Every structure is written in C-alpha cells, then in structure tokens.
C-alpha cells in the first residue's frame, strides 16, 4: 500500500489515501531514532478514518481530518505496526 502511494508521488500523480485502525481510543507509537533516542506520541484514534498527507521513501505523514492541525510522521515500519483495519487509495 505504501509503495503504491510512494510510486504515485514519485511519478507526479496526486493521491488521496486514508486508513482506519483496529482499535478505538488511544494508541501510543514508540520508536528508536537513528541517534538512539526513544521517541513516542499518543494518538486519539476515536474509531474513525485518518488521512495520509505525505510520504517519502522512508516516512509516512498522516493526520486526523477532524483536527488537521496536528500531523504525525512515522517510519514505514512503524506505520506497519499501527494495526490497520482498512486502506483506501485513489490517484488522479
């Protein structure tokens, strides 16, 4: 799924991508940075769809469309551990 979005971006296509998570309530994402520091953030999933707003070769940025002022950036592997229930992608 992420490779499809990344390919669309690399080839100059616009994309709209969303996902929903398996849990409702709060989820905590933790990872180790390249310099060995531990990072984490809490995300209130509230049982609804989140929107992918950007992607690079190794990161995914997403937001809650109901509160789009806060963006979350995670690695591809961290994204894979979120527990995704449904994915949707449209390119144009």
Image (tube, rainbow, N blue to C red):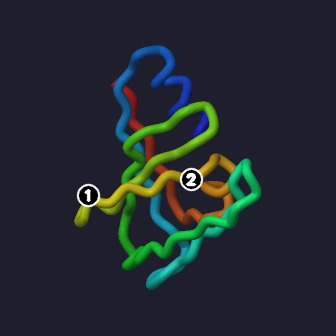
Residue 22 or residue 60, whichever sits in front? 60
Measure the alpha-carbon separation of dots 2 and 1. 16 Å
On the rendered image, what quadrant is the N terminus found in?
top right
Say whether residue 32 is left or right of residue 3: right
Marks 2 & 1, CB-CB < 8 Å contact: no
Residue 85 quadrant: bottom right
Residue 27 seen from this side: yes
Label 1 crowd bin: few (<14), some (14–19), many (20+), radius 10 Å: few
**Residue linked to disc 2:** 74
The correct choice, above or below, for 22 with respect to 25 in the image is above
Q: Residue at x 42, y 39 (%)?
A: 54
Q: Residue at x 48, y 24 (%)?
A: 8
Say whether residue 75 is left or right of residue 19: right
Q: Outermost residue, top direction?
A: 11
Say whether residue 38 is left or right of residue 85: right
Say whether residue 42 is left or right of residue 36: left
Residue 61 or residue 41, whichever sits in front? 41
Disc 2, SS: strand
User: Measured from the top left, where is residue 30 in percent x and y?
Assistant: 64, 68
User: Measured from the top left, where is residue 31 in percent x and y?
Assistant: 68, 62
Disc 1, SS: strand
The correct choice, above or below, for 53 with respect to 31 in the image is above
User: Measured from the top left, where is residue 42 in percent x and y?
Assistant: 49, 75
Tally of numbered discs: 2
Residue 17 quadrant: top left
Q: Outermost residue, bottom direction?
A: 25
Residue 20: numbered disc: none
Residue 1 seen from this side: no
**Residue linked to disc 1:** 68
Label 2 crowd bin: few (<14), some (14–19), many (20+), radius 10 Å: some
Residue 89 or residue 24, whichever sits in front? 24
């Amino acid at each position: 799924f992420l490779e499809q979005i990344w390919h669309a971006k690399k080839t100059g296509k616009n994309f709209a991508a969303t996902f929903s998570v398996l849990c409702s309530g709060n989820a905590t994402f933790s990872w180790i940075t390249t310099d060995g520091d531990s990072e984490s953030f809490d995300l209130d999933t509230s049982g609804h769809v989140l929107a992918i707003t950007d992607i690079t070769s190794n990161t995914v940025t997403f937001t809650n469309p109901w509160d789009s002022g806060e963006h979350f950036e995670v690695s591809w592997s961290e994204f894979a551990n979120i527990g995704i229930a449904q994915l949707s992608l449209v390119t144009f």
